[in-house]
Amino acid sequence: MEMEEIVEEETSGKHENMVEITVKTIGPARPSRLHVPSSIKVLDLRKLIARKNHLPVENLKLILQGMVLHDHEDEDDIYVRFNDGDYLIVAVKPKAPVGLDIDDDDEDLKFQLPQSTCQWKKKLYSFLRNRMKLPDIVLMAIFSLGLKAWALIILWFTLAPIAHKLDLGPLYILGTGFCLIFLNLGRRQPGDVSAYSIFNEDFRELPGTLNADAIDRDIRTGQF
């Protein structure tokens, strides 16, 4: 059984760089041959396959040599380079039932930067995720901290060897712990009452607080 041959005529004038690839859509459809430029945008390739096979472009996933092809990286178009005879797999994600907004794309479950993030942070994020292969929990910790926090962390590690040489290591760590406690105390709004009566005016306690006075009072009134 021969495969259906598809020839794309709109090649942007790059006829000398055309290659022939085999496209296999997961399912009962037969593989087909497709003529494309040797270097093409993934988004253009996705649109081309969707138009030729009458498939929804937003539900297509392209897989080349075991890797999923993405349209963009750091807001830049991604190009894919083909050689003659390359095999491209097309997966069609099923549509969600009517009335339900279900998106089972694993990419949506991963940590992602907001769209308003500056360009250098996006470049750093792409390098750490795609090149260094850092897990999402590490990326979340890195990009959740501001520049001031990172400056303090670098300063702490810079001063740590000095404290060790002066035999002040335990005091240095203990002082760091107290600093973290005081820096994270926060501020109470007027009228707010602390759970610790020592911090309240006239040592006022929260209703329902169990202490020695409450136990003694309950015993005396026969409620125990």
Image (spheres, rainbow, N blue to C red):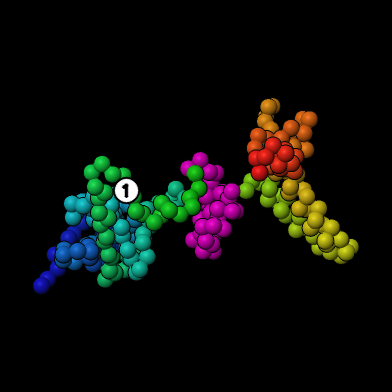
According to the picture, the residue beneath numbered tag 1 turns out to be 102
Q: Quadrant of residue 14?
A: bottom left
At x 88%, y 64%, the residue is 167
Q: Main secondary structure of the magenta part?
A: helix
**Left or right of residue 167: residue 8:** left
- Per the image, is 125 magenta? yes
Residue type beneath disc 1: Ile
**Left or right of residue 32: residue 178:** right
Q: Is 87 above or below relative to 117?
A: below
At x 31%, y 57%, the residue is 61
Residue 151 seen in the current view = yes
**Left or right of residue 164: residue 65:** left
At x 81%, y 53%, the residue is 175
Tell which of 157 and 7 is nearer to you.
157
Residue 216: % across, % down? 74, 41
- Per the image, is 39 magenta? no
Q: Which residues are magenta?
A: 115-144
At x 77%, y 34%, the residue is 203
Q: Is 23 above or below relative to 102?
A: below
Residue 48 seen in the current view = no
Tell which of 43 and 82 is nearer to you.
43
Residue density around tag 1, few if under 14, some if 14–19, many if 20 or more, within 10 Å: few
Residue 5: % across, % down? 15, 64
Image quarter where the N terminus lies is: bottom left
Residue 164: % across, % down? 84, 64
Q: Quick one: which residue is furthest to the bottom in this view?
A: 1
Q: Quick one: which residue is furthest to the front in this view?
A: 222
